[in-house]
Amino acid sequence: YRQEKLSEEMAMKTAEETEKLQAKQESMQQAATLLKYFRYEDRRFTDRLKARKQLKDRGKEEPRVKSCVEARRDPSRLLQPTLGWLYHTRKCEDPDSPTISAPQLHIQHLRKLGKPAWRKGLTS
């Protein structure tokens, strides 16, 4: 009787173990298929993002023409004032013409406001 009972228990254990292994293998297969699907969807999403970014970058590359402009270098012009500065500092030939103002002075050379008369006698 004991041997029959032990053999039945062993058979039950092996049956349970095989069922567990089969269930585990099925769940692993499902997980693998889901992982493949999610990876595929992620790849599609990232490809769409890259395509959008490339479309935006193509639009940005066209206006870069200004940086490619080459100017002629002339060392004799290096220490000469610009036309804007000459216009800014030109002398007024006709004293009656209000269109041309006096040359602008640097901030250090401007006249400072003096102390008011009522404050001259006060000390702090």
Image (cartoon, rainbow, N blue to C red):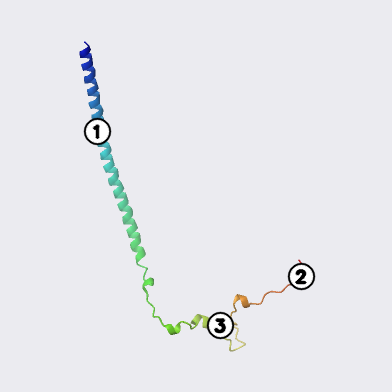
For discs 3 and 2, the disc positioned in front in the rendered view = 2
Q: Which mark is residue 8?
A: none
> Relative to 76, is 49 above or below?
above
Pointer 2 with pointer 1, Cβ within 8 A: no
**Which residue has dot 3 on it?**
89
Q: Position of residue 89 (x, y in %)?
A: 56, 82
In the image: residue 122, left or right of residue 83: right
Please, what is the three-letter code of the amino acid marked with disc 1?
Glu
**Which residue has dot 2 on it?**
119
Mark with earlier residue (2, 1): 1
Q: Residues within 10 Å of mark 3 (few under 14, many from 20)?
A: some
Query: Residues under labels 2 and 1: Cα distance?
Result: 97 Å
Mark with earlier residue (3, 2): 3
Q: Answer with the quarter of the image where residue 61 lies.
A: bottom left
**Which residue has dot 1 on it?**
26
Residue under the image location 29 percent in, 49 percent down: 43
Please, what is the three-letter code of the amino acid marked with disc 3?
Thr
> Which element type, helix, strand or loop, lies under badge 2?
helix
Q: Nearer the viewer, residue 6 or 40?
A: 6
Q: Nearer the viewer, residue 116 or 8?
A: 8
Please, what is the three-letter code of the amino acid marked with disc 2?
Arg
Residue under the image location 26 percent in, 35 percent down: 28
